[in-house]
Amino acid sequence: MPLYNLSIHEAHDLLSRGEISSLELTKATLGRIDEVDGKLRSFVTVTRELALAQAQQADERIKAGDHAPLTGIPVLIKDNMCTKGTKTTCSSKMLENFVPPYDAAVVEKLNAQGMVMVGKGNMDEFAMGSSTENSAFYPTHNPWDLERVPGGSSGGATTAVAAGEAVYALGSDTGGSIRQPAGFCSVVGLKPTYGRVSRYGLVAFASSLDQIGPVTRDVTDCALVLNAIAGHDPRDSTSVDQPVPDYTKSLIPDLKGLRIGVPEEYFVEGMESGVEQVVRQAVGKLGELGAEVDWGVSLPNTPAALACYYIIAPSEAMANLARYDGVKYGFSAREAENMWDAMEKTRQYGFGPEVKRRIMLGTYALSAGYYEAYYLKAQKVRTLITREFADAFARCDVLVTPTSPTVPFRIGERVDDPMQMYLADVCTLPVNIAGIPGISVPAGFVDGLPVGMQILGKPFSEETLLRVACAYEQATDWGQRRPGV
Ligand code: GLN
């Protein structure tokens, strides 16, 4: 197997035994980027020099006996997490030349382990989208079929991990942006419980929904990355002060006594029959592995989640994006008559069409006379959805659903129809509304295109999700297949 296709734990073992160096692994990964990124476009920035320097440092550190699980392993960071000295663009013209003066908390944590960052990942502009086509620079292509989207908004992260351009990645998930592209690219993607991982230094989209999480080739790697990034941070007032267990301890492939619920509402109208079949088979497998499966779970408020999300997320986004006024940082239009004109021109040029749409939706939903009818109503629905999940988790340990209703769609197919694009996250966004954790694992293929299975649990039940994901992974070989790009 080429070095660039190793998992974190495989690479770690080889590094420990001195059979490879971080420099070799990093060079193999950079070589792979040279080979395929012209086709995939996973990266906004490739940080070649930085990666080589960090690899050398990592090798010295390993020699000195200071070897953490992620030391010397190449990683891609989605381009909405601040990296000191390296451009952080959010795939937006607004931040095209923005170089942050500080590191995000997750980047600090990876640095503490001796990370090797090979670059910053392409994404939908400000993480708004489900296909990475909303990048202001260029779309990313799915390594399983270059004519198709990788999903989004963390599309660059999932294509890089699937195709060997990074051993693992960090993505962000506001309504599905880690899990949906993970499903579309056949890799593992976890959205942790809201508050599990610090958002300090993550460019805010919808602050009550955003969460950072791992994108990896297997479930063991997912646990290792979660170990590294989880934990309380006083700089993020919504991060929760709760001990971080060793998540690798939950990788026990045994489902005996575990109660799994399958909510019927997630098999939505318009779902592709091939996808439904794959997911039902995957649930059957969990039953064979010893879990008790309840096919009759109902979460009747699920159909309201999409509308609820598309009021709350744009409302928060509209407030968060008000800071891009061309004054303190980011793009600034200079040819202007006065301050107001400058601000208008800055935002007109700096933001793409989807971002503008969200700002308008949010402004409308929060405006006098509409606030009660839209925003307040959405908050009430949010409470109902959260309670409904809590009730379900009183009866089941986890819920299992499809990650998406379809396989990856064609590039260009949905760009002119926002509603069709929004529907790509219909199975993932209720999870953010309720703040619970969710993981997507490779569950099979339909005509060569990946299908993901989503596993959900109550707040801070990441250990249970990893246990189920691990058991499923060991009983199948879907996750071992690599795209032939
Ligand atoms: N597709 C959803 C949106 O566009 C979710 C994106 C995300 O999770 N960042 O808002």
Image (tube, grey):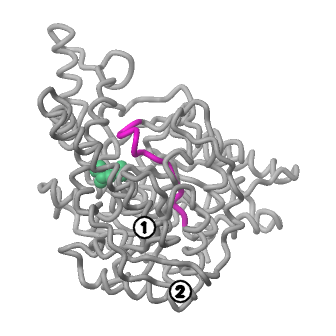
Q: Is residue 210 visible?
A: yes
Image quadrant for the N terminus? bottom right
Q: Is residue 155 visible?
A: no
Q: Secondary structure under badge 2?
A: loop
| Residue 372 shown left or right of residue 260 in the figure | left
Mark closer to the observer (2, 1) = 1
Residue at the disc numbered 1:
392
Q: Residue at x 24, y 38 (%)?
A: 376
| N-terminal-most mark, 2 or 1 | 1
Q: Residue at x 38, y 17 (%)?
A: 328
Q: Residue at x 28, y 85 (%)?
A: 274
Magenta stretch bounds: 204-216
| Residue 171 shown left or right of residue 337 in the figure | right
Residue 49: percent from left, percent from top: 59, 43
| Residue 448 shown left or right of residue 80 in the figure | left
Query: Of the residues shown, which amino acid type is indicated by label 1?
Result: Ala
Residue 358: percent from left, percent from top: 21, 40
Residue at the disc numbered 2:
476
Residue 270: percent from left, percent from top: 18, 74
Q: Secondary structure under badge 1?
A: helix
- Is 207 a magenta residue? yes
